[in-house]
Amino acid sequence: DIVLTQTPLSLSVTPGQPASISCKSSQSLLHTDGKTYLYWYLQKPGQSPQVLIYEASTRFSGVPDRFRGSGSGTDFTLTISRVEAEDVGIYYCMQNLHLPPGTWTFGQGTKVEI
Amino acid sequence: QVQLVQSGAEVKMTGSSVKVSCKASGGTFTMYGVNWVRQAPGQGLEWMGGIIPFFRSTNYAQKFKGRVSITTDAATSTAYMELRSLRSEDTAIFYCATVDSWGQGTLVTVSS
């Protein structure tokens, strides 16, 4: 089974400053179809998770461009260029390499506080 | 982007079953499927299983195999998750989700 390990597990940030979260996979998330099946989600307090990034580096529609996903293979990073107050919550990486319908695996989550 | 609306909160007795529904609007999950995720109080996200109706394919997390069933009704664009033999540790919010859309969550409370 694929294991995703996020670091750090908590992050205290200053508004306007950058922040980064790492997600390491126990095996490559590059599919034979050429896509990398790694997603980033943000769960704001009291809400359902919402997708930020799909296929490792593509911002979902409506996601501010201060969010950037990068990485390949087994190492991935979510970077917030300038943190805003509304960015607080728990960030999760998720993989669903094996399709269909495959298996989803989540990282432990990273709690971001201002 | 499909919108997912789940059924309301449930309170169940230990040993009983719960069936949560998830209705899609603005699209269907016939081709891409729907998954179910559990979140215990104060804990992270835990995948339970998923289904892609088009491929008639279902997959369950090992932890839940034998205790969970995920089905769909194409006529009503509704997915269902049934969890049996409930125990107190199953108290959680259950979400249906596609990769880009999540339901609002259904709180299931299990008590003796």
Image (cartoon, rainbow, N blue to C red):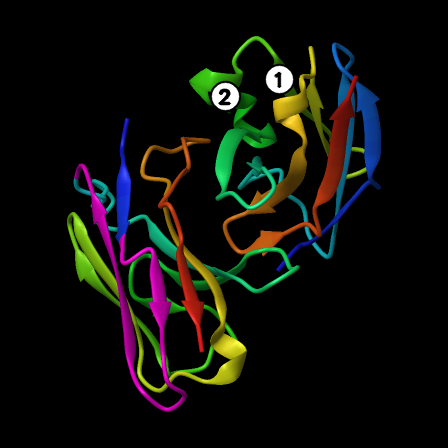
Position in image of residue A66 (x %, y %): 37, 83
Q: Are marks 2 and 1 in contact (CB under 8 Å)?
A: yes
Who's the residue at 82% across and 39% down the image?
A: B9
In the image, residue B49 lies in the stretch drawn in magenta: no
Residue A64: give x, y in percent of width and height.
45, 81
As helix, strand or loop, the secondary structure at mark 2 comes to strand
| Residue A28 visible in the displayed image | yes
Q: Secondary structure at mark 1?
A: strand
Rendering quarter of residue A98? top left
Q: What amino acid is labelled 2 in the image?
A: Tyr
Would you say residue B78 is visible in this rendering?
Answer: no
* Total numbered labels placed on residues in the image: 2
Q: Is residue B73 above or below residue B42?
A: above
Q: Is residue B109 left or right of residue B89?
A: right
Q: Quadrant of residue A45?
A: bottom right
Disc 1 marks which amino acid? Val
Q: In terms of sequence position, does the residue under pointer 2 or pointer 1 come before the other?
A: 2
Please name the residue that numbered disc 2 is placed on: B60
| Mark 2 nearby-residue class (10 Å; few <14, some 14–19, many ≥20) | many
In the image, A46 versus A80, the foreground residue is: A46
Q: Is residue A20 magenta?
A: yes
| Host chain of mark 1 | B
Tell me, for residue B68, which label it has, or none. Answer: 1
Q: Which residues are magenta?
A: A7-27
Q: Left or right: where does residue B109 sit relative to residue B57? A: right
